[in-house]
Each structure stands twice: as structure tokens, then as C-alpha cells.
């Protein structure tokens, strides 16, 4: 992939609303599906138990198949650090998430996968979730660079912290390559630490 | 300007500032386990990279292993496959693995401090959210995802933004029968499950300062349940004494020099925080969660709150919680019937937890309808407990005495809730489905409270049994 392929200036696609606050990563992907040495099968199990318990769950609904922008409430992705959660969403088809707030490790994991998570006000989130439910076929644009979400003729302010935004927009979220660039400075930093050089 | 531990540790580990504005942070200790690493090793292989600092990387098996019969191959073929991958990867990349044969195996967050691997002033990372535990020794410790595990393996670094710092002060003194678990549940209840987002927590104040290292580990463990990126306690005399003589701690005169450095990284007296929160330790009673996140808790003498008592946006979660748990608003939590009792996990699976549990177990027998498990946090904890005869006390009271592992904390092995069973658990998460049954229910509490519930068959104030 060239650097340009990594740039996440904006993501466009149809939306899927998952309402409710504090939806934890155990709910996104229950622990029993973590017993796998690859992430490949994760997409099939996104929200598995929630889907079984609730036939009306958005991930069950035909209207939302093929959607790529997830619209969620407060504290989405709290709990376990399992990257299986964003992997499951990504493999299901999610490319960007708009929500009230996010669990921090989940947010970081999403950045590492090039999935922007944008924060909007409670009011805007509620409006967007309703609007998407009304017109599931209508695409929206998540603009990471301008920090806004556009749906129909409405523009919603939606923010991403600067560091993550720069990574996403600049295409440097694939961090291994970036971190390796530091070269010998890594060992030099280590050698200065008393517990590395010996007390 | 007076500096905090976070300032000092962050600065000492900064390799450079990245173009994104984040810090390239050196990781001093990388702990790994079988569930969140196979994909990371695979990515490393695809990138044709080695482990950058194999001498700073240690692994164990904890999440999927059975805690009853541990003969290989494991009865569960998926668990066996994951264990095999772990053995193969650790060997291929030249990394030490604390497996069953080592006598040092256990939950990754129990063995790090126990072996003296986790030390003050370090940065620590592990592909597990409860890595915050290690902050108890005065380290900055982050839970990370699998792709970040790849980064640490490949570069010994993480790209991180420095969090803000909130000092959480617990003033006064605790009453008898009130434990570290009650303190952290009270903190999360007061500050909220997302109150810590964007923050590191520095736990301080007389109650924290008087705590043993094991109690501090319990506190820091659940920082993540309060939304914080990490949590720590400043290193002091208790920290130094805890580390003395541990296998990976420095020895002899090097230990004294280390101790001096450890104390030097503590927050200075006049340092400023982005925020300070205060709790009165004396006002805390044994805490029990009634809902589906760790912030939904009450004191054992209190009633389950009504959704209307919560701020508007939280009410739907309250209603969902009441429906899932089968509780009525206004019902006292005391007397809620349980089916399963679980003492263990990286929150409360250490020797002092088992001692506190045994103190209560001596006073009764597990109620007939209750299935009760004691799962030590590590092989060494198990050994120490057996040397004191705690296993005998538990078994005599009707508890199962298991081998070390994560067990029913997340139900990745056979230790699972069945159907709608209600569990009294010393673990850290009461999320729907967490303990292995999609409809299972979890009440979080201290180990002593779990045993009290096991004996009486329902949520009970342990102070009445200890009287
Ligand atoms: S005991 Fe529970 S919380 Fe701790 S590492 Fe294991 S699964 Fe995670």
C-alpha cells in the first residue's frame, strides 16, 4: 500500500445506529469468541449475544447491511482492551464511528486500524441516530480533517483529538513503521534508565 | 516546578515527539499472555521483524487455561491450540514463558509484581486492560490492543498522548470489614465509569498510604473500570519492602541504590494536578454492584436506586440493568439470592485476599444451592495459601480449591455461569455476559463479602459474620 492508501481524510457510507450508553467490548465481542489465533472470524460474531437476545438489534436488520458508519452513545467500547472488538466491527464493514464518547483503549485500537472515532454532542448523536434510522439508505460523510459529519443538508461538529487526527489524516496510523524510524534513539533512551543500565 | 511521578516517568521514557504530536514512549517491561498475542506475532513475522528487546519481555498462560484438570493436551481443543501457539511463538522469538512447569505461572497482573518484574519508575505495557494494576508499585502501566502489542514487540515503544492527571485522595480511615475493593468500587461510583477518560489517576491520602502493596494492587487494578488510562500510587517504604528479595528485584547494594531511585520518582509535595477528587474513607461501607457496569453499586445497607435518581442520559442503562438483573428499584441489595460464588482474578486473587476470604469461610459452610470456587491468582499464591492451610479451610467449608488462572472472571475456560445464574464475584467486571453466560448476572464485591454470600446464600453484610 502506498502512503496515500492509509490517509483517512474522510469516510463516506451508510450509517447504522446502535443506541445505549456504556456498550462494553464484552458486548461487542463476547470472550468465548476470543479463542482464535487470527482475527478472521471476528466479523461474524460482532454483537453476537446482543443480536440473539434482540431480534430488532440493528446488526440483525437488513436495512443496515452494508453500512459503514456506526453511530453510538456515550462511553462506547469501554472495558476490555481486546482488539477483537474493533476487528469484529471492521470485518463486519464498519469504517468510521461517531459517538458521544469512547473507551480509551478501544479508541486507540481503532486508530491503529485506521478507523476514525469522532465525538459529537449528545443532542447531535440523538438526532443522527434517529435520522439514520429513518433513512438507512442515505449515505453520510465523516470528515476527519474538518471534524464534522455531514448527513443530508445538516452538518454536525464532531471532534477527534489532535494526535489521532494527524495520524489518521496523514496516514501514519500504521505506527510500527513510524516508531521504527527512531532507530538507535530507542536504545539510547533505554540505556539512560537506571533499571536498564543497572543500579 | 514541582513534578509528578507521571511527569518524571514520562520524560525519562520519551524517545521523541512524533509528527502527530504524540510521544514515542519507551516501554520498560512488556508482559504478554496467550489470548492477545498470536495475531501480534503473526504480524511481526509478516513484517520480518524480531523482538526489539527480548530481555524486557515476559509471558505467561492465564486466560484460557483450565483450572481443574491441567493435563495437556487440554480438553478444549481451542484452548490447546492457543497454548501451543504461545509456546511456539515464545520459543521462536527467544522469550521466557512462565508456564505450569515453571512454578511461576499465574494471572499476568499477579505475577508481574509477585516476581519483582514490575518496579517503580517503569513504563509497563500488556495486551490486557488491567495492566493498570502494576501502577501500584509506582509504575506507569498501560493496557494495549494487539496491534500495539506488535509495536512493543517490534520497537519496544508505543505512540501515546500523555494523559491528564487527577489525584484521587481517600481521607480518614476505613472501618473494620471494609477492604481495598470497597474503596475502589466507591471511587468508581463517585467519579463514574467514564469519569477517568483522558486521565491517569494518582491514588493518595492517608487510606491509600496505609495500604499494603496487595491492597494498592486491588485499587490500581480497577482504574480502567473508572475510565482512567492508568492509575498509580507513589512508591514509599511499603513499596521498597514489598520488592525486597523478589526474584527479579535488584540484589544487595544494588537494591539500596534502586530503592533510592524508586523513591525519587514519587510526586513532589507541591506538584499540581489537573484535578483533585476526595473521598471520606470512614464513610465507605462494604460495596456491592447491582447493575451492569462497575459504577452501578451501593453500600450493602442501601437500596437499589431508581432510574429517576440518575441523570437523564443514564436512565436507559439503569432500566436495562434492572431488567437484566431482575431487580426492582428500591429493593435492598442485602438478601439478593446468589447461585455462584467466585473468589479470584487479578483484582482479588492474591494471598491477602485468600486470607480475608478464609477468615470468613471458617465461620460457616457454603449454602446448599451455591456453587463456590476459590481460584488463586498464581501458582505461588496457591503454594503460599496451601502452606498456611487455607485450602483446607476452604474445602472444609465446601469451596472448590482450583489451580491458578483467570477462570470465571471472564469465562474463557469451563468456569462459566449457566443460564441466568447470579454470581457473587471478587472480579472486576459485571458486564452482561462477562462470566461466560450471555444471560448470567454478576454482583461485584470484596472476597470477604463473596464468602459471606456463599455461606448465607444471599448478599450479606460481612461485618455481621465477623462480629
Ligand atoms: S483475571 Fe480477569 S481481568 Fe484479570 S487478566 Fe484475567 S480475565 Fe483479565
Image (tube, rainbow, N blue to C red):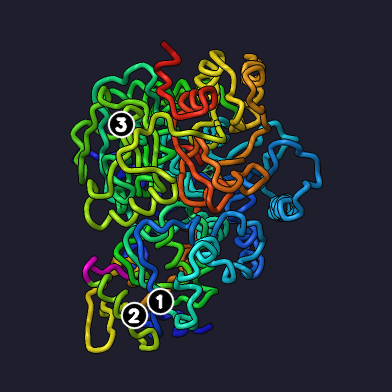
Q: Quadrant of the C terminus of chain B?
A: top left
Circle number at residue A132:
2
- Going from N to C along the chain, the mark reached first, 2 or 1, is 1
- Identify residue for label 3: B302
Q: Secondary structure at mark 2?
A: helix
Q: Magenta span covers which residues?
A: A118-123
Relative to A171, is B449 above or below?
above
Residue B376: percent from left, percent from top: 60, 30
Q: Residue furthest top?
A: B467
Specify whether residue A122 is painted magenta.
yes
Q: Chain of mark 3?
A: B
Q: CA distance from mark 2 to mark 1?
A: 7 Å
Closer to the camera: disc 2 or disc 3?
A: 3
Q: State left or right for residue B143 relative to residue B310.
A: right
Q: Residues within 10 Å of mark 2 (few under 14, many from 20)?
A: many
Q: Residue at x 29, y 27 (%)?
A: B284
Relative to B137, is B225 above or below?
below
Asked if marks 2 and 1 touch (Cβ < 8 Å), the reply is yes
Amino acid at each position: 500500500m502506498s502512503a496515500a492508501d492509509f490517509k483517512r481524510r474522510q469516510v463516506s457510507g451508510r450509517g447504522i445506529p446502535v443506541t445505549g450508553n456504556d456498550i462494553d467490548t464484552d458486548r461487542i465481542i463476547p470472550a468465548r469468541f476470543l479463542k482464535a489465533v487470527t482475527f478472521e472470524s471476528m466479523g461474524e460474531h460482532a454483537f453476537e449475544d446482543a443480536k440473539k437476545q434482540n431480534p430488532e438489534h440493528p446488526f440483525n436488520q437488513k436495512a443496515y447491511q452494508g453500512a459503514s458508519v456506526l453511530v453510538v452513545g456515550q462511553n462506547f467500547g469501554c472495558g476490555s482492551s481486546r482488539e477483537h472488538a474493533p476487528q469484529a466491527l471492521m470485518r463486519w464493514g464498519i469504517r468510521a464511528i461517531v459517538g458521544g464518547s469512547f473507551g480509551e483503549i478501544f479508541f486507540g485500537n481503532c486508530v491503529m486500524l485506521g478507523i476514525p472515532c469522532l465525538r459529537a454532542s449528545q443532542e447531535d448523536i440523538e438526532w443522527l441516530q434517529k435520522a439514520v434510522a429513518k433513512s438507512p439508505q442515505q449515505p453520510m460523510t465523516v470528515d476527519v480533517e474538518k471534524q464534522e459529519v455531514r448527513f443530508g443538508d445538516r452538518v454536525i461538529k464532531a471532534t477527534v483529538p489532535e494526535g489521532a487526527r494527524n495520524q489518521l489524516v496523514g496516514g501514519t496510523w500504521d505506527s510500527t513503521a513510524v516508531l521504527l524510524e527512531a532507530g538507535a534513539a530507542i536504545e539510547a533512551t533505554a540505556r539512560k534508565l537506571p533499571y536498564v543500565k543497572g543500579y | 516546578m514541582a513534578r509528578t511521578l507521571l511527569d518524571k516517568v514520562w520524560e525519562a521514557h520519551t524517545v521523541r515527539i512524533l509528527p502527530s504530536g504524540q510521544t514515542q514512549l519507551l516501554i520498560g517491561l512488556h508482559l504478554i499472555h496467550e489470548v492477545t498475542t498470536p495475531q501480534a506475532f503473526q504480524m511481526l513475522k509478516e513484517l520480518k521483524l524480531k523482538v526489539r528487546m527480548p530481555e524486557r519481555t515476559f509471558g505467561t498462560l492465564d486466560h484460557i487455561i483450565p483450572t481443574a484438570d491441567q493435563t495437556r493436551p487440554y480438553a478444549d481443543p481451542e484452548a490447546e491450540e492457543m497454548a501451543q501457539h504461545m509456546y511456539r511463538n515464545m520459543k521462536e522469538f527467544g522469550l521466557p514463558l512462565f508456564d505450569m512447569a515453571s512454578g511461576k505461572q499465574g494471572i499476568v497482573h499477579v505475577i508481574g509484581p509477585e516476581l519483582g518484574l514490575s518496579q517503580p519508575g517503569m513504563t509497563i505495557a500488556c495486551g490486557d486492560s488491567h495492566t493498570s494494576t502494576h501502577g501500584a508499585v509506582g509504575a506507569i502501566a498501560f493496557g494495549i490492543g494487539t496491534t500495539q502489542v506488535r509495536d512493543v514487540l517490534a520497537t519496544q515503544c508505543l505512540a501515546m498522548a500523555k494523559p491528564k492527571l487527577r489525584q484521587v485522595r481517600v481521607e480518614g480511615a476505613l472501618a473494620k470489614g471494609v477492604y481495598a475493593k470497597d474503596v475502589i468500587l466507591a471511587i468508581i461510583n463517585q467519579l463514574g465509569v467514564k469519569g477517568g477518560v483522558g486521565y491517569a489517576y494518582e491514588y493518595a491520602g492517608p487510606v491509600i498510604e496505609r495500604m499494603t502493596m496487595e491492597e494498592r494492587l486491588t485499587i490500581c487494578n480497577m482504574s480502567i473500570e473508572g475510565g482512567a488510562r492508568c492509575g498509580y500510587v507513589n512508591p514509599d517504604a511499603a513499596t521498597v519492602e514489598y520488592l525486597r528479595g523478589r526474584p527479579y528485584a535488584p540484589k544487595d547494594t544494588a537494591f539500596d541504590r534502586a530503592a533510592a531511585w524508586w523513591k525519587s520518582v514519587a510526586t513532589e509535595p507541591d506538584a499540581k494536578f489537573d484535578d483533585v477528587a476526595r473521598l471520606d474513607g470512614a464513610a465507605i461501607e462494604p460495596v456491592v454492584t447491582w447493575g451492569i457496569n462497575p459504577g452501578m453499586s451501593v453500600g450493602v445497607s442501601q437500596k437499589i436506586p431508581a432510574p429517576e435518581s440518575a441523570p437523564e442520559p443514564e436512565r436507559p442503562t439503569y432500566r436495562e440493568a434492572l431488567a437484566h438483573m431482575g431487580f426492582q428499584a428500591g429493593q435492598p441489595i442485602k438478601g439478593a439470592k446468589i447461585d455462584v460464588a467466585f473468589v479470584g482474578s487479578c483484582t482479588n486473587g492474591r494471598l491477602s485476599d485468600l486470607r480475608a476470604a478464609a477468615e470468613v469461610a471458617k465461620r460457616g459452610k457454603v449454602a446448599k444451592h451455591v456453587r463456590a470456587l476459590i481460584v488463586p491468582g498464581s501458582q505461588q499464591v496457591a503454594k503460599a495459601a496451601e502452606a498456611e492451610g487455607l485450602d483446607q479451610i476452604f474445602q472444609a467449608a465446601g469451596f472448590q480449591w482450583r489451580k491458578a488462572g483467570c477462570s470465571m472472571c471472564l469465562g474463557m475456560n469451563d468456569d462459566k455461569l449457566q443460564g441466568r445464574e447470579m454470581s457473587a464475584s471478587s472480579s472486576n467486571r459485571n458486564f452482561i455476559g462477562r462470566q461466560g453466560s450471555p444471560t448470567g448476572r454478576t454482583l461485584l464485591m470484596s472476597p470477604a463479602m463473596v464468602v459471606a454470600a456463599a455461606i448465607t446464600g444471599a448478599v450479606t453484610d460481612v461485618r455481621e459474620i465477623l462480629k
